[in-house]
């Protein structure tokens, strides 16, 4: 079949061209990896592969070799880790993941890259189970990171290798991480604020921060959900806050939910901010989560409260609602947890005083029921 090459206009015309053989290919140079890639469609699916070459003439030859009939195709199995890493990150970006999620994937891949360099691993074929099992130890002992960070990185790496081992991609003949066991580290529960501490923060933090603390403590919203809460999401007539999936933003879990408005919030939510969001910075404009946390910790130190994070207010909400007799399913729906098991990890452990009081109250109820049964038998 004949060959047709069309060059793109613009400053990058030397770094990209189209070639039509049995199918249509877009060939381009990736400046981050230093290799030529090609993109094409097969069975209605867009595919992108590295050609494994660094010059344009070699790229043209490689594309023609790829276009040979299936029985004559010779698969390249020695993809470099660097190429593979960039392809995987590009794929995740195209899936519409949140910027923070992409940033976490990118940080993980860079850490894995440092580890592979220390192990002299340059190509995918050199990744073995023994190499993978050494990564958590490298991340914690050499780089001094937390066990949870090492565990999360391991999960991301397994995701990448599983993605590359799919037969249609052809990057890995087999998945080296199939037998890699990555148990979640056992850690104590995070601290949840006590009622007295929340009351102190509601009254004692800086003025513009007070409504934010009250809202987080009595809705169970995540910080990102609060920062993206718009005026139209607050329905004072129905007495609910609607957390909704939008074009420009999606809550964790990517699902809509409603949260009932606590009486403490009525005065806060009825005050309309100047912009489209309910909560704004002290001088107007968007709030940043890091700035919120820094201000909270400074105020906690001034109030003599043990320093904690904003997410612990979500733990306070779940624990308080459950202790107030709200059903677990209602608490789960209000907080947007996917399952009861996930929500239960947020509940604070009972203090010795609370445990003793709960036992005493249970004994009083049991004695009352016993006396009722005696009176019933006696006809009283």
Image: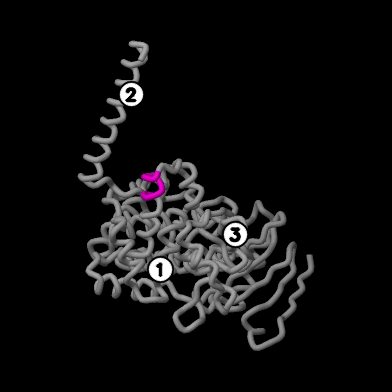
Q: CA distance from mark 3 to mark 1?
A: 29 Å
Callout 1 secondary element: helix
Q: Which one is in front, 130 or 51?
A: 130
Local packing at callout 2 (Cα closer than 10 Å; few below 14, some 14-19, many 20+) is few
Q: Residue at x 62, y 66 (%)?
A: 232
Q: Which residues are magenta?
A: 319-324
Q: Which mark is residue 244?
A: 3
Residue 46: quarter of image: bottom right
**Furthest-bottom residue in view?**
11
Against 274, residue 78 (above or below) is above
Q: Which mark is residue 369?
A: 2
**Furthest-front residue in view?**
380
Is the Cβ of the residue at disc 3 closer than 8 Å to that at disc 2?
Answer: no
Residue 24: quarter of image: bottom right
**Furthest-top residue in view?**
378
Q: Which one is in front, 375 or 244?
A: 375
**Within the magenta stretch, is there residue 321?**
yes
Q: Point out the tag, 3 or 1, that comes first from the N-terminus.
A: 1
Q: Point out the tag, 1 or 2, that comes first from the N-terminus.
A: 1
Q: Residue at x 34, y 69 (%)?
A: 203
Residue 219: percent from left, percent from top: 46, 57
């Amino acid at each position: 079949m004949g060959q047709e090459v069309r060059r793109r206009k613009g400053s990058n015309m030397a770094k990209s061209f189209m070639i039509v053989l049995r199918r249509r290919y877009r060939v381009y140079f990736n400046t981050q990896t230093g290799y030529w890639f090609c993109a094409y469609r097969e069975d209605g699916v867009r595919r992108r592969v590295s050609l494994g070459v660094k010059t344009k003439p070699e790229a043209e030859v490689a594309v023609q070799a790829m276009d040979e009939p299936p029985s004559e195709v010779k698969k390249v199995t020695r993809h470099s880790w660097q190429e593979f890493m960039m392809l995987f990150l590009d794929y995740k970006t195209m899936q519409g993941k949140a910027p923070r999620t992409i940033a976490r994937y990118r940080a993980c891949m860079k850490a894995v890259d440092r580890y592979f360099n220390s192990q002299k691993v340059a190509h995918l074929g050199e990744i073995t189970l023994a190499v993978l099992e050494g990564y958590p130890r490298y991340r914690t002992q050499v780089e001094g990171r937390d066990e949870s960070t090492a565990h999360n990185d391991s999960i991301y790496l397994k995701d990448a290798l599983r993605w590359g081992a799919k037969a249609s991609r052809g990057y890995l003949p087999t998945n080296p991480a199939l037998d890699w066991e990555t148990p979640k580290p056992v850690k104590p529960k995070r601290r949840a604020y006590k009622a007295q501490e929340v009351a102190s923060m509601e009254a004692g933090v800086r003025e513009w921060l007070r409504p934010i603390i009250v809202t987080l403590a009595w809705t169970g919203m995540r910080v990102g959900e609060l920062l993206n809460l718009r005026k139209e999401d607050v329905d004072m007539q129905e007495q609910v806050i609607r957390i909704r999936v939008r074009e420009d933003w999606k809550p964790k879990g990517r699902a809509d939910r409603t949260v009932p408005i606590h009486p403490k919030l009525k005065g806060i939510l009825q005050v309309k901010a100047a912009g489209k969001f309910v909560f704004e910075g002290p001088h107007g404009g968007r709030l940043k989560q890091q700035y919120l946390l820094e201000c909270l910790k400074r105020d906690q130190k001034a109030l003599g409260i043990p320093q904690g994070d904003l997410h612990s207010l979500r733990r306070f909400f779940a624990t308080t609602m459950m202790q107030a007799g709200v059903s677990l399913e209602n608490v789960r729906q209000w907080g947007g947890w996917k399952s009861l098991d996930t929500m239960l990890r947020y509940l604070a452990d009972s203090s010795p005083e609370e445990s003793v009081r709960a036992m005493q109250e249970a004994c009083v109820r049991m004695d009352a029921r016993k006396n009722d049964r005696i009176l019933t038998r006696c006809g009283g």
